[in-house]
Amino acid sequence: MKPILLFDIDGTLLHVKKNFLHEIIHQILTEFKLSNVSLKNRSFAGRTDRDIFSELIKEYSHVRDLYHSVSSRYINLMTDNLSDDDVDMIDGVPEVIDYARQQNLAIGLCTGNFREVAYAKVGAIGLQNTFQFGGFGCDHHDRNHLPGLASEEFKEKFKQPAKSEQFIVIGDTPNDIRCAHHFGAKAVAVTTGGFKQNQLRDQNPDLILDSMSSPEKWLPKLTRASQT
């Protein structure tokens, strides 16, 4: 059985420029008159969009349908305005994607992003039509459930079963590692986001990388284990 790769997006495949993202969120806060909401000292790393927006509007939870309205507006603004000028692809990403294709490995997403936003982001770095299934932040607030949701989509898409140990989750935060372990998958941690090796090592990933470059050197170590 071939291994199945699940990629996180932000900090793993790409970086969205902070100015662009902050402008989008501030526009939403202004439009919906959420004057008490501050982005200062908030960390979004490793969290789901569903969790983030639920927290942002917590003080306004009494407003009917606010979460749906705010999240829908965010999705529309991101999908309508995000371009290749607003994102930076992380070094090594084209290499690992090309290598996975050469090895005929299934490639999916395991991301806290809303589904539409996820595909807009990977499309902005030229990877549209690359990821055919995934687990997304719109489907559950808890990231631990996302690999399982990706597995269900894989089975539906390819009409074949997949064991949890076939999956390899690649991400840049401790939460990516935890969700992989929760599902029974392997975890590859990359330091291309905001976390250093020692912070990631505490969660006991199967592998830590500073770059996904030269996948022919590191990915076979995991894929051979997945095929046994």
Image (spheres, rainbow, N blue to C red):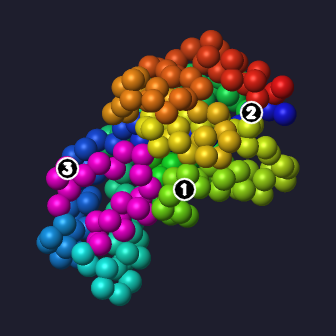
Comparing 43 with 83, the one in front is: 43
CB-based contact (under 8 Å), mark 1 and mark 3: no
Relative image position of residue 219 (x, y in whole percent):
65, 21
Q: Which residue is mark 1?
A: 136
Tell me the quarter of the picture where residue 39 sits: bottom left
Disc 2 and disc 3: Cα gap in Å? Answer: 38 Å
Q: Residue at x 25, y 67 (%)?
A: 28
> Element at badge 3?
loop
Residue 107 on the magenta span: no
Q: Which residue is mark 2?
A: 3
Q: Residue at x 61, y 40 (%)?
A: 181
- The count of marks equals 3
Whether residue 105 is visible to the viewer of this picture, yes or no, is yes
Q: Amino acid at mark 3?
A: Asn
| Residue stretch in magenta | 38-58
Relative image position of residue 148 (x, y in whole percent):
66, 53
In the image, which is nearer the foreground, mark 2 or mark 3?
Answer: 3
Q: Amino acid at mark 1?
A: Phe
Answer with mark 1 or mark 3, whichever residue precedes in sequence: 3
Q: Is residue 225 above or below residue 89?
A: above
Q: Is residue 207 above or below residue 167?
A: above
Residue 43 on the magenta span: yes
Quarter containing the C terminus: top right
Comparing 224 with 21, the one in front is: 224
Whether residue 30 is visible to the viewer of this picture, yes or no, is no
In the image, which is nearer the foreground, mark 1 or mark 3?
Answer: 3
Q: Residue at x 60, y 26 (%)?
A: 206
Disc 2 and disc 1: Cα gap in Å? Answer: 20 Å
Image disc number at residue 41: 3
Image disc number at residue 155: none
Q: Amino acid at mark 2?
A: Pro
